[in-house]
Image: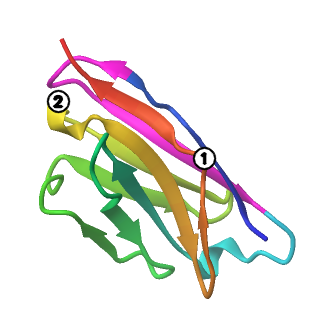
Amino acid sequence: QVQLVESGGGLVQPGGSLRLSCAASGTIFTFSLYTMGWYRQAPGKQRELVAIIISGGTTNYADSVLGRFTISRDNAKKMVSLQMNSLKPEDTAVYYCYARRIDAYWGQGTQVTVSS
């Protein structure tokens, strides 16, 4: 089993920045082997991929956040982060941390609201 705990959400004005963090833990859990990522779900919409980072460090982003968001991982600390810059109102959503090697695991989510 893998447990994921997100932090760092909140209210920010358009054009602002936020940094989300996700701490991973669990028994028999080799963090460095897992694909880690962030998804988000806005009200009335399906959950969508924001960014992922595989065990080797390769990253992939949704077109809507490319150039504004950066995903990173710290294998020693078992953490994955999402730096979000130039935030837009349409980035408002609950953001979920994701981990997968064979089975997929999700965090409880953290709210990000972009509004003036």
Q: Looking at this view, is 12 or 59 the one in front?
A: 12
Query: In the image, is residue 43 above or below residue 107?
Result: above
- The alpha-carbon separation of the residues under discs 1 and 2 comes to 22 Å
Q: Residue at x 42, y 57 (%)?
A: 38
Residue at image location 45% in from the left, 30% down from the top: 9
Q: Position of residue 15 (x, y in %)?
A: 15, 25
Tell me, yes or no, whether the highlighted magenta stretch contains residue 18. Answer: yes
Evaluate whether residue 116 shows in this view.
yes
Relative image position of residue 21 (x, y in whole percent): 53, 44
| Quadrant of image for the N terminus | bottom right
* Above or below, comparing residue 84 to residue 96 in the picture: above
Q: Secondary structure at mark 2?
A: helix
67 relative to 9, above or below: below
Residue that badge 2 annotates? 89
51 w.r.t. 114: above or below: below
Q: Residue furthest front?
A: 44
Residue that carries the numbered disc 1 in the rendered image = 108
Residue 92, quarter of picture: top left
